[in-house]
Amino acid sequence: MPYHWPEDTQFEKLTLEVEDKDCPECGRTTTICDHRFHRVHTLGGPLKMTMKLTHCPDKSCPSHSKTLSPEAEFGIAMPYWAIAWDVFAWIGQRRFSRHWSVPQICYELIDTYEITLSEDVIEDYISQHPAGIYDLRPQPNEDSHRATEHTEQEYFKKL
Ligand SMILES: [Zn+2]
């Protein structure tokens, strides 16, 4: 999903390099052949990543046409995402554990983090969440909820 960044957005900058610079085919040290940029919202502010892409300098090597990309990018965000994992997790936590509505999430992101995402876009990210990772059972500190359950169980026992 393409994201429109306002021109005056102030990005924190991060340059990422390929971790393993050895060619997987012939073992030569790969060289920088291109750059790729990826801009994302993080809870700490907008971030612009510059990825230094490398390839094997040996034209006869089967790996010459293959470009290596820094894997650290995946630790921050999925490619083509406009948000980092921390925002993704924040959205999922509010939606699935706290049952916030999408408009509420949308408003809170703008209000607290100055992250402007449309409701459609938020829905899209929510749909990518594996809901099973969230423990949807009442947590131990939610005593009132537990008390209600207990009462219901007792109620059914009496029937
Ligand atoms: Zn090679």
Image: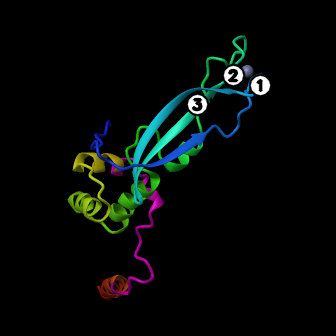
Asked if the beta carbon under badge 2 is closer than 8 A to the nearest atom of ligand 1, the reply is yes
Amino acid beneath label 2: Cys
- Measuring 46% from the left and 36% from the top, which residue is drawn there? 37
Asked if the beta carbon under badge 1 is closer than 8 A to the nearest atom of ligand 1, the reply is yes
Magenta segment: 126-144
| 25 lies left or right of 45 | right
- Which label's residue is closer to the chain start, 3 or 1? 1
Amino acid beneath label 1: Arg
Labelled pair 2, 1 in contact (Cβ < 8 Å): yes
- Measuring 31% from the left and 40% from the top, which residue is drawn there? 3
Quick one: which residue is furthest to the top in this view? 60
- Residue that mark 3 sits on: 53
Report helix, strand or loop for mark 2: loop
Indicate which disc residue 28 carries.
Answer: 1
Q: Position of residue 17 (x, y in %)?
A: 61, 39
Q: Position of residue 9 (x, y in %)?
A: 32, 48
Indicate which disc residue 56 carries.
Answer: 2
